Image: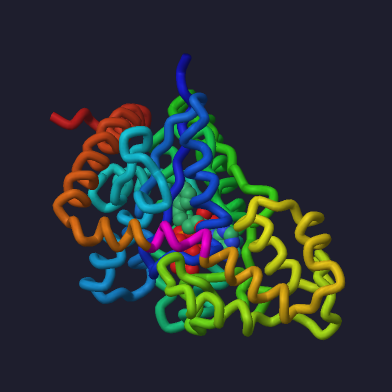
Amino acid sequence: MMKKRILSGVQPSGTPTLGNYLGAFRSWVALQDDPQYESVYCVVDMHAITIRRDREELRRQTRELYALLLAIGLDPERNVLFIQSQVPQHAELTWVLNCYTMFGELSRMTQFKEKSARHPDNINAGLFDYPVLMAADILLYQAHLVPVGGDQKQHVELTRDIAVRFNGVHPDVFTLPEPYIPPVGARIMSLTDPTRKMDKSDPNPASHVLLTEAPDAIMKKFKKAVTDSDAQVRYDTTQKPGVSNLMAIYALATGLSLEETEKQFEGQGYGVFKPAVGEAVVALLRPVRERVEALLRDPGFLEAEMARGRERACAIAEKTMADVRHAVGFLPKG
Ligand code: ATP
Ligand code: LTN
């Protein structure tokens, strides 16, 4: 039986947050036990330079993020884990796909509008073209399924539109991908402003919990999390966005349902509820932090895993790229 392929990516733009974990990484780990699939995950450092970055910091964050993917439980045997810039076919396919993507389509992307509003002095072409590089990431590996948080759905849909357009001219080159978005946790919200998603690039550290954060810092952030004045633990994302976000976090961290969570805290105020959410998150993240620290103490091991991942990724990517070069009319590579 031919396995279906899964592909996803994460930017080395800072230590990932609880939002990244609950929205995306958790399903990556769960999917590796499903024999129908084989998975490819990349640290997308080329996406990260759409915003100005210090080179040493980018290198450090790329290594740390790679270690973190291993620490959350992704097995480098069963999954291909690699660094995007080490596989040059990503840049090569992006150019070709640019010629199959419309200016109007890219202008409608929510993330572009948000990021260009946040960095008005650096609205570069890379930021505009970001979704096409993401489409190349996905289509190079002929991915069927793309597990992401809800914020990336629009980009996966655009990838599909680009693939349909390309296949319309050159039949059967690309597999059409589908987004895979978890039903609860698709959008974990900021702890200081529950109308915005929790974001690792948010300058206010109280807004997010980092996956490697110390337990006392985590407890403090949950105790201060923005809620409301009615003191009832009830799930209602429009009337009570802060409490509902904390309930989703608690439910995902403990494995309880939202109803069970509501029942557990019935008649108890936020003074009991908020520290309980903090403790559940501390327990969830403790093993991850310990494993990352151990992995970063062994750079030789990390380098060897990256090299192995790059080789496996290149083999798949080159096969697709050879088909694409042929389809568009480039001469074969010598
Ligand atoms: P940045 O803030 O630098 O743009 P990001 O966290 O939005 O970063 P990535 O690190 O590339 O972007 O995201 C990795 C995965 O985490 C993606 O699948 C994304 O959909 C998911 N994700 C990010 N934030 C959240 C969130 N608050 N809730 C759920 N999923 C999220
Ligand atoms: N755009 C995504 C990160 C990303 C990605 C991908 C996700 C880059 N390439 C391929 C899934 C598949 C983000 O900003 N979170």
Residue 297 left/right relative to 273: left
Residue 12 left/right relative to 159: left
What span is in magenta? 283-289
In the displayed structure, 284 sits above or below 176; it is below
Is residue 288 in the magenta section?
yes
Question: For residue 227, which quarter of the picture?
Answer: bottom right
Q: Dominant secondary structure of the magenta stretch?
A: helix
Residue 288 left/right relative to 204: left
Residue 4 left/right relative to 77: right
How is the structure coloured here? rainbow
Count of labels in the image: 0
Residue 326, given in percent of the width and then of the height, sits at 31, 27
Residue at 69% across, 67% down: 245
Residue at 28% across, 42% down: 89
Is residue 126 in the magenta section?
no
Q: Which residue is nearer to you in this view: 231 or 130? A: 231
Question: For residue 93, which quarter of the picture?
Answer: top left
- Residue 24 seen: yes
- Furthest toward the top, the residue is 1
In the displayed structure, 154 sits above or below 305; it is below
Residue 121, given in percent of the width and then of the height, sits at 42, 83
Q: Which residue is nearer to you in this view: 186 or 94? A: 186
- Residue 134 seen: no
Residue at 53% across, 52% down: 24
In the displayed structure, 91 sits above or below 294; it is above
Residue 46, given in percent of the width and then of the height, sits at 32, 58
Residue at 41% across, 46% down: 73
Residue 164, given in percent of the width and then of the height, sits at 55, 35
Name the image quarter holding the C terminus.
Answer: top left
